Image (tube, helix red, strand yellow):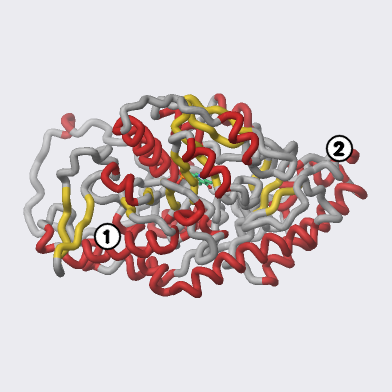
Amino acid sequence: MSQELRTNGIVQDEPLLWEKGRKGRDGYSMPLRDVEKASIDESLLGDGPDFPDLSEVDVVRHYTRLSQWNFGVDTGMYPLGSCTMKYNPKINEKLSSYIGLTRSHPLLPAHLSQGTLRLLYELESYLCEITGMDAVSLQPAAGAHGELAGMLIFHAYHKSKGKKRNKILIPDTAHGTNPASASLCGFQAVVVKSSEKGILSHETVAELMDEDTAGIMVTNPNTLGLFEKNIRKIADIVHEKGGLVYADGANMNAVMGIVQMGKIGVDVMHLNLHKTFSTPHGGGGPGAGPVCVKKELEKFLPVPRIRKVKDAYALVENIPESIGKLHTFYGNFSVLVRAYCYILSMGPEGLKAVSQHAVLNANYIKEKLKDHFHIPYDRPCMHECVFTDKFQEKHHVSTLDIAKRMIDYGIHPPTIYFPLVVHGAMMIEPPETESKEEIDRLIAVLKIIAKEAEDNPEIVRNAPQFARMRRLDEVTAARKPVLIG
Ligand SMILES: *Cc1c(COP(=O)(O)O)cnc(C)c1O
């Protein structure tokens, strides 16, 4: 086989359309003119835009080949940690694209949008039940946006009590968006160190909590994949000093149907519908991060709110203490439809089974790999498990090398070097949608890589070998991005 013609399976190099174009090719056939040709002053036309001449098949192959460079959850497992990259059932895509839903214009008056409003109203009530909270706003468009709403609610609450509080406690295992959202609202983030068990101790919180502190923001389960089991005691300490408890519920995939955050002292939380509740995510697509609150805080939720009066649904705008509007209309509607369909198709038992399987999968991986990769916190985990490169260090093989080598075996690398509290972290989240065979394949690949690191570390250090691109210069890519071809 000639070296030049060789391709790596379907991984093909694809030139720019400008390089592919050949003068005189076209990809359309227009009907013949049925009117006389009119004369036109050619000098007015200029040279026109610099578009390449391409046939239909040139264009179709170009874009299809580009699409094959992508790795997605429809191609294979995507074991990122802290992100829940699970497979989303296609039925929810289909239902959310029904014409009655996609064409329902948000400016229609409420009496002509009863179906839409009912769907949103019911979704709010399902989310209340899942979280154990009393009221929900579906408006925030992402997890971080839900956090922002939550922090604005904290602020509004303390203001209504006549006291300005400017600090907020945030554990070192929190998701990075937490301190960012808090400081966007003017709060100063105070770091709470986790114990050697990887979770918060109530004593540490008690030392830091005072009457200038608005409350605490806890990611639960935390980014080590561990459940903050002292949360109840911590909530009591924070409440006693007049503070509020925020739970980042983006990791709800681990606890649905098992823990109701509202029952363990949480006052405000957000969910990531685009992680747990069946909206594909990644690449900055639309999301939804509903913010859920306890009764006392309902009056601060963003407007409009959906109310049910007798059998009709209405939008209420005039709520004086509300933090205001966070999104046009009532949020990213089609994401909300997917979540609604997902919850109804799973039912309460199904949602609980999701969490049980996600947790089982993570613990299975942890147990199977613990002799091959170092585990910083060896306790039963929730939906994700964290390894490090400590065993591989002596062969000069790092977490980055291991992640790159996984690409050679056709597996998307996990989240690496996060959480920050773990040196050389590799964080794996195998959601419930992965079968035992897929998970066993991941385990087998990682065992092979661990062995390669001992016997043939060069191979791991030089990975990926089989990908279209080898190692990119990530620093230059981040500092001097080339955004045009
Ligand atoms: C993903 C995630 C967020 C942020 O959600 P976005 O939708 O990306 O803004 C916040 N907290 C945790 C724990 C997450 O996993």
For disc 2, the neighbor class at 10 Å (few under 14, some 14 to 19, many from 20) is some
In depth, the one of 444 and 404 nearer the eye is 444
Of the numbered discs 1 and 2, the one sitting upstream in the chain is: 1
| Left or right: where 464 falls relative to 273 | right
Residue 464 makes an appearance in the image: no
In depth, the one of 49 and 259 nearer the eye is 259
Q: Residue at x 29, y 45 (%)?
A: 301
Q: Are marks 1 and 2 in contact (CB under 8 Å)?
A: no
For disc 1, the neighbor class at 10 Å (few under 14, some 14 to 19, many from 20) is few
The correct choice, above or below, for 193 with respect to 313 in the image is above
| Left or right: where 406 falls relative to 43 | right
Q: Position of residue 22 (x, y in %)?
A: 43, 46
Image-quadrant location for residue 124: bottom left
Q: Amino acid at mark 2?
A: His
Q: Element at badge 2? A: loop
Q: Looking at mark 2, is its residue's CB closer than 8 Å to ligand 1?
A: no
Report which residue position mark 2 lands on: 396
Report which residue position mark 1 lands on: 29
- Which residue ends up furthest to the front in the rendered image? 240
